[in-house]
Structure formats: C-alpha cells, structure tokens
Image (cartoon, helix red, strand yellow):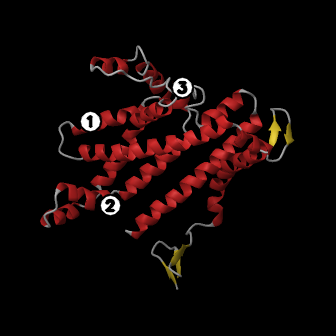
Amino acid sequence: MTALSEAGSAISHGGGRAIRRSPYPGWFFLPAALVYGILFLAPTLASLYFSLTRWTLFNSTFIGLDNFAQFFREPFLVQGLVNTVIYAVVTSGLKVVLGMLLALLLTSAVMARGYLRSVVFFPVLVSTVGVGITFTVLMHPTQGMINEALALLGVKGPGWLVDPKLALLSVALVDVWKGVGLATVIYIAGIVAIPKDYYEAARIDGATKWQNFLYVTLPLSRPATATVITLSFIGGLRTFDLIWAMTRGGPGFSSDTIASVIYKQYQAGFYGLSTAGNVVLFILIAILVVPLTMLLNRRQGHE
C-alpha cells in the first residue's frame, strides 16, 4: 500500500518497512553530492590507492598489499592497534558512567547549579594540547603537584607517565576529565526531556529514588547514552593530540595509539605504510562503530 503523507512524501509499506520518497527533485541534491564527492569520496579513494603503493611527493610504485603485510608484521604497530581499542573502551565507558552521575547531580536541586554546569563543561573548551602540557607537569613523578599532594597523605605517587603500565591509562583519565563535560550536557538534555508524568506515576506507586533511576531515568535516557557512547568511542579510536602532547607514545611504545604510530611513520618518510595504517584505522572504526550504532538504535526502536 502506498500512502501520500501530508508533507507530500510517499511512504510504501511492505513487509513492515517504509520507503520515503523525497519531495525534492534530483538536481536539488547535486551541490551537496559534489561537495561530498570532492571533499570525502575522492580523498578516501585516493588513500585506498596510495596504501597499495610506495610513494613520495613526486612518484609512486604499485606494490599491492605489501604495506598491509608489513603493518601487521611490526609488533609496535599491532600494539598501537591494541592500545587504541583499550583507550577507546576506557574513555567511552568512564564518560558514560561519570556523565550520567554528574547529570543526575546537576539536574537536582543542588545549590549554584548553573555555575556548576559551567565548571563541568569548561574543560571541553580548553585546548587539548594545553591540557596535555598542563597535566604532564602535574603528573611529574617527583615534582608534580599530584604526587606531592599524595605525599602529604603518606602515599607514594606512581610514575603516571613514565611507568609503561600506567602511561596509557593516565592519558585516558585526562581525556575523560576533558571530555566528560560534553557527555554531561548530553545527559542533562536527555534527563530534562523525560516527561514528569513518569515520575509522578512512580511516586504514586511508592517507588524509591533508586527505583526511579533504575526504571524511569536510566531506560528513558537511552538515546543520550547511545549518543555519548558513539561520540566518545569514535573520539577514542581517533585520539592523537592528547597522546602526543603528554607521552609521544612512550615510554617505548607503551602508550602509542594507531594515530600516533601513523604520524611517526609519516615523520620517518614511510608514506605508503602510513597510508595503509590510515586505511586500517578507517576499517577498524567502521567494524566497531557501525554494529555498535545499529545495536543501540535497534534497542531504542524496541522501546
């Protein structure tokens, strides 16, 4: 059956799926298609081609999949790949949890709520490189303010950025501090959009505050959760500036991510290998983010 909507778009219903016909003519999309093709599609195809070559600024030689084979033979490149996934999971997970908790606090009747919201969001506006340099000083193993504060409490502070076991997680914590403000704002928008009728019905049924959160706030904030997970996970997979400002991938290769490894390869003049790394990063993001987004949207659709 085909029905014409009020907006002039036709919706065909068949097998439970709807096909919406655009009310605009085809030429209307031509400018956007040209911009997309020039700025996004052409560079992507060029990257795919140059990842199969050994190239310089003046010439290129086709070598097939050799760059990809070399990429996966190098242990530090594989470690960068693993570090990237760990970094993305840690930062996105913490931003979801802390963002939700801060949003609950900042939508309650707490004093100076507007000021506190500004304080939480302020790190988002600060330069990432500036944040990295500042925390590099604060996390200095002997002269940093963080370890000096721990020493006053009788606790010996660790080598946040010089211990290979802690360096990546230390940078991830700084990333969470800088980015949790955006997650909080998204959650605040989601929570204040929940109709008050749900809380009133829960109050009449005798629900506790914990039950209000568990059965009303948490499920109805799922669109905000999906947005925070998607944005922070993609940001974690693409991270480079904070890593480079704080550790440059060190000590050794312990905090290298795939983006910092790619940059180092460009610096060394291995342009083909670097381009192959970019293609691997593109595929990695697509493999992880597309199913995750489909899963989150599917769960929203079932509600």
Disc nearer the start of the sequence (1/2): 1
What kind of element bears circle 3?
loop
Identify residue type, mark 3: Thr
Q: Position of residue 97 (x, y in %)?
A: 35, 46
Give the tally of numbered discs.
3
Say if mark 3 contacts mark 2, CB within 8 Å: no
In front: label 3 or label 1:
3
Give me the residue at 26% from left, 58% from top: 214
Looking at marks 3 and 1 on the same chain, the residue that comes earlier in the sequence is marked by: 1
SS category of the residue bearing label 2: helix
Marked residue nearer the N-terminal end (3 or 2): 2
Quadrant the C terminus occupies: bottom left
* Observer-nearest of 139 and 152: 152
Cα distance between the residues tagged 1 and 2 = 25 Å
Q: Residue at x 42, y 14 (%)?
A: 142
The residue that mark 2 highlights is 219
Q: Tell me the number on the disc at residue 247.
A: 3
Q: Residue at x 82, y 47 (%)?
A: 64
Q: Is residue 43 left or right of residue 201?
A: right
What distance separates the C-alpha of mark 3 from that of mark 1?
A: 31 Å
Residue 70 picture location, percent across and down = 75, 40
**Vertical arrangement, residue 40 with respect to residue 202, above or below:** above
The disc at residue 104 is none
How crowded pointer 1 is (Cα within 10 Å; few <14, some 14-19, many 20+) is rated as some
Q: What residue does disc 1 label?
A: 116
In the image shown, does 151 or 144 lie closer to the viewer?
151
Question: Hey, what amino acid is under mark 2?
Answer: Pro
| Residue 105, position as x, y percentages in the image | 24, 44
- Residue at the extreme bottom: 1
- The crowding category of the residue bearing disc 3, from other C-alpha atoms within 10 Å (few below 14, some 14 to 19, many at least 20), is many
Which of the two discs, 1 and 2, sits closer to the camera?
Answer: 2
Q: Which corner quadrant of the image does residue 255 belong to? A: top right
